[in-house]
Image: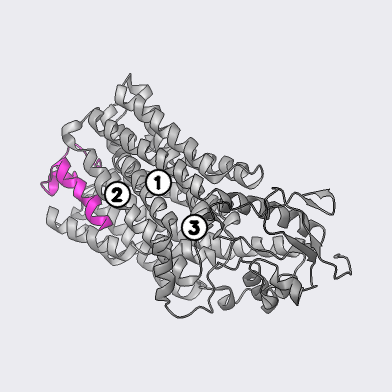
Amino acid sequence: MAPKTDEITTLPAQEPHVEDELHIQPRQSPVEGEDATQITGHNHERMRDRGLLTYEEEKKLLRKVDWHLMLLCAVIFLVKNVDANNAANARVMNRGTPRNILTQLKMTGDEYNFVSTVYYVTWGIALACHAAVTSKGGLYVARFFLGLCEAGMFPGIILQLTYWYRADEMTIRFLIFYSFEFFANVISAVLAFAFDTISGRCSLSGWQWFFLVEGVITIAFGIALYWIFPDFPEQASWLTDREKRFLQARLPANSPRSSEAHFNLGEILEALKDHRLWWFTLLWAAKTIGGSGLSFYLPTIVANLGLVSIAESQLLTIPSAVLPMILILVSSYLTDRKGVPYPLVALVYLTATLACYAVLYAYPNLGGVYAATIIAGSASNAWFSTMWPWRLQTTSRATGSAFAISFVNSLGQIGTVIGPQIFRSAYAPKYTTSFAVAMAVTGLCIASTAWTWWITRVTERQTWHMRKARIAAAKRGEMVLNDIDIDADFEKSAALRTATTIAGRPV
């Protein structure tokens, strides 16, 4: 139980040049007057509501939100990725037979690359319509409308999570999120293997059954979402009024809120002036150029190794879906429990990817190439789980956050247009030139990541120390009134607003 005192404890700063201090006080004891003006991000109503629940009640509430919201978001992402990955798997289904998609549509390998390019430039119905295409032009159009429907899904879900969680709580949630994405790779590979065996049933090729069944499932799931998906905490029928108020109050001042119903052009202009936006966009674009081609071509590369039959090669891509889950679990532990910086984990993944590309460039033997392909694809996929929490630390308000997330995600996806074009059939089967280009672009991503870490170092370190202080205070029945100052990165001599002790006790 929280102590029955209204005394505010001011935390001494960790750094000698700190300009601000953390304010700790018992829950349900809001601070007012002059003391309130000294607290970064202070809002009387929000500070009052932060004390509505105890620490144990807060943990129970977050588990409740995880079960109702995160699980649903993860299933949405799973369905989306099963749909998105089917083009890569369909490419090698019934390979070497008249039922292969390239043979039936009279396409070359290079022409098929544009399937991915067009895709990223509606969902359900568009996917089901894949079964009716009879030419490469029809396939391009079908992928265009599928991508058109899905384009806003990912940034929309990322924005959705910012209405429910703080940035420092995202990594473990992304484990749930991305685990389902990688499970989608498993589902796609298994379905491709299954439908490969029924090719010709009802005059449909295996790849046509593949697209048709996935499309019907997507349509049914999309209709159900209209009734079961909550937009904001206020709309969740499974939350009490007290829980709704607490969920919104615990978010930092820069988080988007459902009360911000109107579009705010000024927030977009401010976001565009923020140089961090452009650096994050650059490293995102470099990452997707260096990694998306490998993801798109993974089934083809494995099939070209000739280790097993074409159908069985679909199953050899499954390790690339399982390993990222393990990597995200480890990175979640390191960032959430040990305070390892998000950008450091991201740099480790990028370095591992670069090393694997070097192996693929050298092409020592089939086993080495297969192992390097799996590790590179896994590290490349796990990278996103550490990058999004880092990026969300510096977004602000509803319109600004929505714009920043979509801007980075959309312009950063230029790699999904360029990446598959790097892996052209002319470079098969070793793709030496392709991996040389991927190495160069990944090197650019490493450099831009290191620089972006430097210019966001204040906010990044603040976030970790604030999280540590909040947890320590919560266990004593207290709460931290301060919020992260996301503008501190702009101050040339900005000191970290962090703390190490409360009344002489280590945090």
State the image coordinates of residue 80 (x, y, percent, origin top left).
38, 58
Residue farthest right in this picture: 4
Q: How many marks?
A: 3
Residue 182 covered by magenta stretch: no
Q: Which residue is mark 1?
A: 185
Q: Label 3: which residue?
A: 74
Q: Is residue 307 above or below residue 406?
A: above
For the point 19% across and 38% down, the residue is 424
Which numbered disc, 3 or 1, marks the residue that appears first in the sequence? 3
Q: Are marks 3 and 1 in contact (CB under 8 Å)?
A: no
Asked if 69 appears above or below 352 in the picture, the reply is below
Q: Is residue 431 above or below residue 418?
A: above
Mark 3 is on which residue type? Answer: Ala
User: Which residue is depicted at the point 60% across and 55% down?
Assistant: 169
x and y percentages locating residue 425 in the rendered image: 18, 36
Q: Which residues are magenta?
A: 92-121
- The tag earlier along the polypeptide, 2 or 3, is 3
- Residue type at tag 2: Thr
Q: Nearer the viewer, residue 27 or 38?
A: 38
**Of helix, strand and loop, which one carries label 1?**
helix
Q: Quadrant of residue 249?
A: bottom right
Kindly state the secondary structure of the residue where label 2 is placed.
helix
**Color encoding of the figure:** one colour
